[in-house]
Image (spheres, helix red, strand yellow):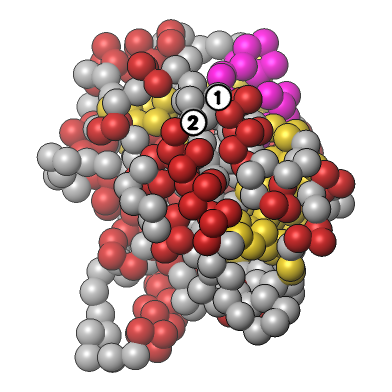
Amino acid sequence: MIQIVGAGLAGCEAAHFLAAKGVEVELIDMKPLKFSPAHTSEKLCELVCSNSLKSDDVYGNACGLLKEEMRRLGSVTMAAAAETRVPAGGALAVDREKFSARVTEILKSFPNIHIVSREVVGLPLRGIIATGPLTADGLAEAIGKEYGGGLHFFDASAPIVSAESVDFSKTFTQDRYGRGTGDYVNCPMTREEYETFVRELTGAERAALHEFEKSEIFEGCMPVEVMAARGRDTLRFGTFKPVGLTLADGTRPYAVLQLRKENEEGTSYNLVGCQTNLKFGEQRRVFSLIPALAQAEFLRYGVMHRNTYLHSPDILNADFSAKNDPMLFFAGQMTGVEGYVESAASGLMAGIHLWRKLCGKASVVPPATTVIGALSRYIAAPNRDFQPMNANYGVLEGGFEDVRDKKERRRLLAERSLAEIEAYKNLMFENS
């Protein structure tokens, strides 16, 4: 029996793939016996920071392309996301409760997946460690002892407010540049309102500030107060940018906070891009300065927590196996891929590679012209300043440099990638 430690996105992807191939799997998670600082649900595949899986644009966004690659390889998280999605313009967002419930239901339907609740404190003899960036101390210590520890940065999540507490008379519904079906609620601010908000945001008290150092904050999960401290207009050119949005009178607002549905019923909204480490009382005070949120009821406050990841170039091969143990794999954010989709993709790949080895076959990493293959290679390539990596065109192997139109070039890159994934799938799964 193969052990998979950790039932997040990566662990669930690996368990699903292996079980579908007839492998006996023991899926181990410490929930509900014990919860990490960021987890609250007893269900598998819990989404912690956001309900958004980012862009679903296959031909214009690298993460959208990665999703399609995963779909073609049989991803369970992409299937569950399709069933539980909520309106989010060009992004793929899900009702997080229904998403976790659906993945849990699918995995429990396999008689050869044995879900066990216990805390693992040692390395399995063979299998996959996918315990994520908040790996419990006992296992983290065992990994550190074997592989020299890990690096870490701090990750943050955004607050969620109740829909009935939002003053919709001070909002307008519109997707940026008119793309989508009106899935974002926009909270406009005048210059005076914005500058007041930024002043109070940057001066607000942060939680356990003494525990954090600026160098440890990862750019991809930057707290909104840290971004604001970089300059008065930083948010207006980022999270609060008004570009592509128009008020009823045809003018552009000075700044805009966007709200996105957190669940299918639309009873709660996520403050888009507002990951924060402010104290809870300060979050309520500062975000209530935004006119539409003056009476906001906070259903969940933003939190910040440490994310630990391996220095994978020294430890892992491109198939996510340990260099000193070909039958022990790692997957998820702890390998240095950053984001829900990227984590799930690494779990899917670890499952594929482990299955190949169980069949007596060699691992075959997807081509570097695919996003999933490029990320696999990224985590194993020599890199002194290794940091977590999101799906992006920069990691893809080059091509079509003579095409000057960016949209056309990305379309060509996507077509090449999907053709390569189809060929890879045929090679991997032939006679299986």
Q: Note whether 205 is above or below 99 in the view shown.
A: above
Which labelled disc corresponds to residue 171?
Answer: none
Query: Does residue 164 appear left or right of residue 56 in this picture?
Result: right
Task: Confirm or deny contact between disc 2 and disc 1 (CB under 8 A).
Answer: yes
| Apparent side of residue 29 relative to residue 83 in the rendered image (left or right) | left
- Check the picture and name the quadrant holding the C terminus: bottom right
Residue picked out by circle 1: 279
Q: Secondary structure at mark 1?
A: loop
Name the residue rendered at 27%, 11% in the picture: 145
Q: Nearer the viewer, residue 373 or 427?
A: 373
The residue type indicated by label 1 comes to: Lys
Of 107 and 372, the residue lying toward us:
372
Whole-angstrom CA distance, mark 2 to mark 1, is 8 Å
**Tag 2, which secondary structure?**
loop
Q: Nearer the viewer, residue 419 or 218?
A: 218
Q: Which mark is residue 204?
A: 2
* Residue at the image point whose x is 48% and y is 46% from the top: 198
In this picture, residue 181 sits left or right of residue 92? right
Quadrant of the snapshot with the N terminus: top right
In the picture provided, is 427 more to the left or to the right than 244? left
Instruction: For residue 123, say whether it is visible.
Output: no
The magenta-colored residue range is 30-48
Q: Residue at x 24, y 44 (%)?
A: 380
Q: Quadrant of residue 353?
A: top left
Q: Amino acid at mark 2?
A: Ala
Residue 222 at what x, y percent from top left?
A: 41, 43
Q: Is residue 78 above or below residue 322?
A: below
